Image (tube, rainbow, N blue to C red):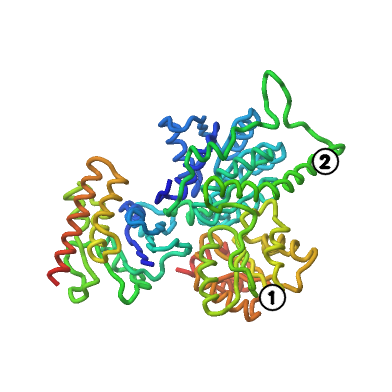
Amino acid sequence: MLKQIEGSRAVAEAVAASRPQVICAYPITPQTHIVEALGAMVKKGELNAAFLNVESEFAAMSAVIGAAATGARAYTATASQGLLYMSEAVYNAAGLGLPIVMTVANRAIGAPINIWNDHSDAMSQRDAGWIQLYAETNQEAADLHVQAFKLAEQLSNPVMVCMDGFLLTHASERVDVPEQDQVDVFLPSYEPRQVLDPDDPVSIGAMVGPEAFTEVRFLAHERMRQALDLIPDVAADFRQWFGRDSGGLVKPYRTDDAELVVVALGSVLGTVKDAVDELRAEGIRVGALGITTFRPFPVQAVRAALDGDHRLRRVVVLERALAPGSGGIVTADLRAALTHETVNGTIIDTVVTGLGGRPVTKKSLRQLLGRAVLGDLPEFSFLDLNTGLVEAELARMRATRRSGPSAENLLRDLG
Amino acid sequence: MFAVRFHGRGGQGVVTAAELLAAAAFREDRYAQAFPSFGSERMGAPVMSFCRIDDKPIRTREPVTEPDALLIQDPTLLHQADLFDGLTADGYVLVNSAKGAVAPDQPRYRAIPASRLAIAHLGRPLPGAPMLGGLAALTGVVSLDAVVAALNERFTGKVAAGNVAAAIAAYELIAEVSTNA
């Protein structure tokens, strides 16, 4: 049903339409509205699910692991420090091959404490063995949840749906919320590959030594390889039932004959596309590539999108998280994908942008892409960095041993 | 594209007002996007929210920096230097104030006693609904009918009725001033 609706609410309705049987919740900004809405639906009797208020994120993930092991369709949501706090159990969920679906309402990680959006939280768990999908809009966020249950259950592997905190979770926009009868047809009931059943007892969670640990890990990698085939199929299936494009591996935008392609994940793609259209109107051959599936990393799809045209000279990766001392996280995967076989000398620049809620503006993007086209961009840079602010602190640190806490110093400088 | 920036204080319904404007535009089959300024808002602290309205899907996610209309829900914020930042040359300003016109010679700038109207009709000084009624009259970006429908969708019973009455009263006040001008 077409609605003007807050992103969190749209996701809650899509999750409810997926008929989860167990929902575990611990509140953390900016995820809270989602589980609040689901809790209200359960209380009103609109959703037949067990809603567990747990004492921490570690408990939330542990409880959905238990629920999934009994064959229940299980869901939770978190963000930021909450995701870190449940991290051990996040790895266990994937290692055990349990098809949990979790929303991560992307938010920065402290210190310094910051409630605003970037991708530091989800990126920190990129190698936990979960499928990671990144939503561009609230429409896609809602749709990806319905797809996530199908993917998770077919593969017996957990799926993390990442949506930008505040920018999506707290934004009201037009969403065609998946209808119950459509979801019921699209999403079959869950048939677990493994289940704790007193009538047919098994144990789940064996200790595995050197004799088979590598092989169990191989199978985790194999599930991800299978996911690369399944994700486009599920997206195509979704298109057939719901009549719209959501999900998939990558989303090329005006990449044909592009000299420059911007690679990004999540909601920043909207602003990027506006900038691309303006530059195209000025005759600059620029395009964008959205990476919807970040784990597994869709190497072939990325190559196909970026390697189809010999005119491509430069790729700019917008990183919404920073790997201190290394640089860009997405860049590393992209570089590996492009250099293994091919790439006719394409230059890859990394731009760290939108950290801790700093707006990514079309104006700054246009300046950035203008510089990139001219080849005037360093290999690694920060967009809209206040260089005066960092230089003042660096000078203080050189001048005095006890220069004090940097975050506080910077805030004092800003007045 | 028509972009609105709302300024108010935590607890005044600034975010709700932006969402209601988006809902009103949606009812008129337009695309709309509403979002808050995402601070750790506290009761009484200055807050902002944004609403964009367009005939095509809205893709940008950046805050509204060049508003076509400013809705200032608390006149004590007028002392903030950057309140009018980026206002377009032909932009509208609506201030919640019982002191009358802010700039009588400027037909796009209007004051409206939104808190007083809200107290009279709703019993609480929540200026959102009358501000939206005033915006509908001042700009025509949404109709009064759409604002009323959005209020009736969001609220029920006495709260809906009070908000609707306050919005209509505000609409009539602004429409009357514009007619006399």
Q: Residue A192 at x, y = what percent?
A: 66, 31
Category of crowding for the residue at label 1, using alpha-carbon neighbours closer than 10 angstroms: few (below 14), some (14–19), many (at least 20) = some
Residue B113 found in image quarter: bottom left
Category of crowding for the residue at label 2, using alpha-carbon neighbours closer than 10 angstroms: few (below 14), some (14–19), many (at least 20) = few
Q: Residue at x 54, y 34 (%)?
A: A20
Q: Residue A241 at x, y = what percent?
A: 54, 45
Nearest to the observer: residue B96 or residue A411: B96
Residue A398 found in image quarter: bottom right
Residue B176 found in image quarter: bottom left
Q: Residue at x 51, y 30 (%)?
A: A49
Question: Disc 1 marks which amino acid?
Answer: Arg
Q: Do tag 2 and tag 1 residues touch (Cβ < 8 Å)?
A: no
Residue that sits furthest to the top in the current view? A199
Question: Disc 2 marks which amino acid?
Answer: Glu
Which residue lies under the disc numbered 1?
A311
Q: Residue B13 at x, y = what percent?
A: 32, 52
Which residue lies under the disc numbered 2?
A215
